Amino acid sequence: MGDTGAVRGGLLHLDSSADRRGESVTRTLTGLFARSWRERYGDAGYRYRDLAAEPVPLVGSGYVALGTRTERQGAVPLAKVAALAEGADEEREWALTLPLVAELRAAGTVLIGVPMYNFGVPAALKAWIDRVSFPGAFTDPDSGRPHLGGTRVVVVAACGGGYGPGTPRADCDFQVPYLRAYFGELGVAEGELHIVRAELTRAGDIPALAPFRDLAVDSLAAARAAVTELAVRPLGGRPAALHM
Ligand SMILES: Cc1cc2nc3c(=O)[nH]c(=O)nc-3n(C[C@H](O)[C@H](O)[C@H](O)COP(=O)(O)O)c2cc1C
């Protein structure tokens, strides 16, 4: 505590693993991050969302209609979108969307636990991404600058297999490259997008992966060290290292 100058906007912590038995690697790692962050900065700026336990509703037709109408207006401030909504369906969609967008924009640090599911990200996370990515929501209508230009994003990923360069499935990784592209497009600065990934998490269960158990242990240890360090690194600190 007492280090509140570095909190800037607080911590938004999202988990998306379907595994709520206490064995989830991403939940354990994001939990480690959140614990050290809260010990250092206190609870006031901390927000938590379990996207698997309380799924964000999929975007519907009213969302698309309101988004399209908003896009046609050019740069629309968030506060003026409600006035563009036509009918109960669009109003309902906006009521589901605005709090999530506001929560993301207000965060100084966004921490996201992301397992690899079928080479990509869980549907629970994708539902949140689709909803918060409302047209123009992350660009300042006056300056054209991204709202998340000063936000730190920490992606804590896990995958059962291995996807490193030169491995047979390297081309099948649609988890980390996707999130890198998405948050880059949202305007998160390259030096503030931190990706930590524990690989080969199923090496202890799947016989074919048994030869890689030592690598799995090393990967998890590196991920633990990375999240522990990132949790207490002041915003605007030195450039990110990549652990994956
Ligand atoms: C529905 C599902 C799909 C999965 N698909 C993949 C996959 O495509 N590639 C992979 O390496 N691991 C896959 N896994 C394994 C998970 O990525 C791995 O167990 C990871 O540790 C899950 O994160 P968690 O421990 O936080 O739940 C899958 C697991 C589940 C439950």
Image: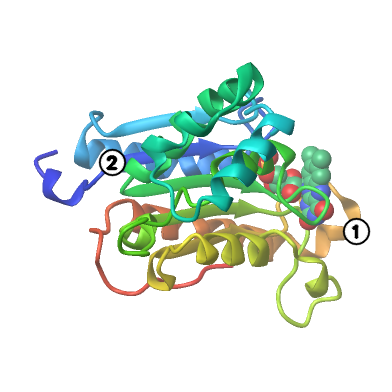
Hey, which quadrant is residue 16 in on the image?
Answer: top right
Residue 14 in view: yes
Q: Amino acid at mark 1?
A: Ala
Q: Is residue 60 visible?
A: no
Q: Which residue is mark 2?
A: 10
Label disc, if present, on residue 153 of the rendered structure: none
Residue 180 picture location, percent across and down: 58, 65
Tags 2 and 1 touching, CB below 8 Å: no
Which residue is under mark 1? Answer: 208
The residue at 67%/62% (across/down) is 178
Mark 2 surroundings within 10 Å by alpha-carbon count, few (fewer than 14), some (14 through 19), many (20 or more): many
Q: Residue at x 67, y 37 (%)?
A: 65
Q: Amino acid type of disc 2? A: Gly
Identify which residue is drawn at 61% across, 28% down. Answer: 22
Q: Position of residue 103 (x, y in %)?
A: 40, 36
| Mark 1 residue element | helix
Q: Is residue 99 left or right of residue 149?
A: right
**Residue 40 coordinates in the image, percent (x, y):** 21, 42
Give the position of the N terminus as an image quadrant.
top left
Question: Does residue 171 lie above or below 141 as drawn?
Answer: below
Quadrant in which the C terminus appears:
bottom right
Q: Residue furthest top?
A: 88
Dividing the picture into quarters, in which one does residue 208 lie?
bottom right
- Relative to 4, is 69 on the left or the right? right
Is the CB of mark 2 within 8 Å of ligand 1? no
Q: Is residue 47 left or right of residue 93?
A: left
Residue depicted at x 34% and y 74%: 239
Dot 2 falls on a residue whose secondary structure is loop
Q: Nearer the viewer, residue 236 or 78?
A: 78
Q: Is residue 201 above or below residue 84?
A: below
